[in-house]
Amino acid sequence: MIEFRNIKEKELLVHYANEFGDSNILNIIESGVSSELEAAALAKFYWKIVDETIEDKDLEYILERIYTTLHIHCGNNGYSDVWDNEIP
């Protein structure tokens, strides 16, 4: 399970998972990562959000918090290298 410090982090991720029609990511958000493939999918999803919202400066702070949360989660589950390898 991903431990979010702020409910807005999870809400934003769920919003974009729904917008992108990505049910796999919705499952990962709820359950956490349990494989390298899921860690890579989560990282790619995060960077897709960043690309989609690059012009929205209001999201910059929450995206930084989400990055930290997801990076820590992947690292705690043994997938920090997978996460890092997906950084564009």
Image (cartoon, helix red, strand yellow):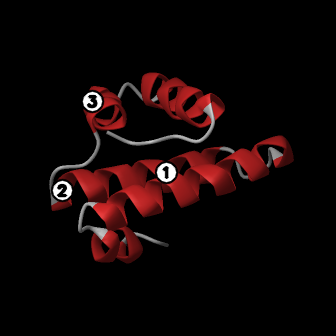
How many neighbours does mark 1 have within 10 angstroms: few (below 14), some (14-19), or many (20 or more)? Answer: many
Residue 56 x %, y % = 80, 44
Q: In this picture, is 10 found above or below 41?
A: above
Q: Sequence-wise, which precedes: disc 3 or disc 2?
A: 3
Q: CA distance from mark 3 to mark 1?
A: 15 Å
Please name the amino acid that badge 1 sits on: Tyr
Say the numbered circle drawn on residue 37: 2
The residue most toward the right is: 57
Q: Give how far across and how far down residue 78 sits, in percent.
A: 23, 68
Q: Which residue is mark 1?
A: 46
- Circles 3 and 2: CB atoms closer than 8 Å: no
- Tell whether label 2 touches label 1 (CB within 8 Å): no
Residue 12 left/right relative to 77: right
Residue drawn at point x = 59 percent, y = 42 percent: 5
**What amino acid is found at the position of numbered circle 3 in the picture?**
Asn
The disc, 1 or 2, on the residue closer to the chain's N-terminal end is: 2
Q: Kindly identify which residue carries mark 3.
A: 27
Q: Is residue 44 above or below residue 10?
A: below
- Nearer-the-camera pick, 47 or 84: 84
Which disc, if any, is residue 75?
none
